[in-house]
Image (tube, helix red, strand yellow):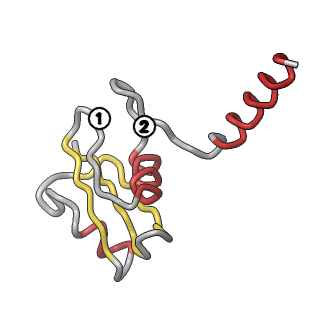
Amino acid sequence: MRFVLLLAALAFASVANADTVVARRGSVVSAQDHAVVIARRGSLVHSSCGQYEGIGFSTVSAEHAKRSCCFYGMRTPAEIGVAWSPLRRGWFAVIRYR
């Protein structure tokens, strides 16, 4: 019986986490993955990617969210990610700079 419960728990855990991106300390995810994570959370949180990083939010458009990021127009972007948040009804953007 314990074995069946263990299998059921493992199956549920893998289904629940199938589309979740988890950034562990010391790991680096892409800017797009980070944008998806903060859009799901509904809050602006910097990652520990070790690069200059700007994050922004806008209810107007994805482009406006990108322009709201720190360092926008001052540094050269290396990677850009944008994601829609149904929770906040707006766009979250992450730009990593060189």
For the residue marked with disc 1, what is the amino acid?
Cys
| Relative to 97, 9 lies left or right | right
Q: Secondary structure at mark 1?
A: loop
**36 sits left or right of 94 in the view:** right
- Which residue sits at x=46%, y=67%? 85
Residue found 31% across the figure and 74% down from its top: 58
Seen in the picture, residue 62 relative to 96 is either above or below; the reply is: below
For label 2, the crowd category at 10 Å Cα-Cα, with few meaning under 14, some 14 to 19 and many 20 or more, is: some
The kind of residue on which mark 2 rests is Val
The quarter of the picture where residue 81 lies is bottom left
Q: Which residue occupies 45% across, 62% down?
A: 83
Q: Which of the pair 82/2 is nearer the observer?
A: 2
Q: Which residue is mark 2?
A: 29
Q: CA distance from mark 1 to mark 2?
A: 8 Å
5 relative to 68 in the view: left or right = right
User: In the displayed structure, would residue 15 be above or below residue 74?
Assistant: above
Q: Residue furthest left?
A: 74
Where does the N terminus fall, quadrant-wise?
A: top right
Residue 30, given in percent of the width and then of the height, sits at 42, 42
The reply to whether dot 1 and dot 2 touch (C-beta < 8 Å) is yes
* Left or right side of 90 for 66: left
Q: Earlier in the sequence, mark 1 or mark 2?
A: 2
Q: Which residue is mark 1?
A: 49
* Label 1 packing within 10 angstroms: few (<14), some (14-19), many (20+): some
Q: Position of residue 37 (x, y in %)?
A: 44, 50
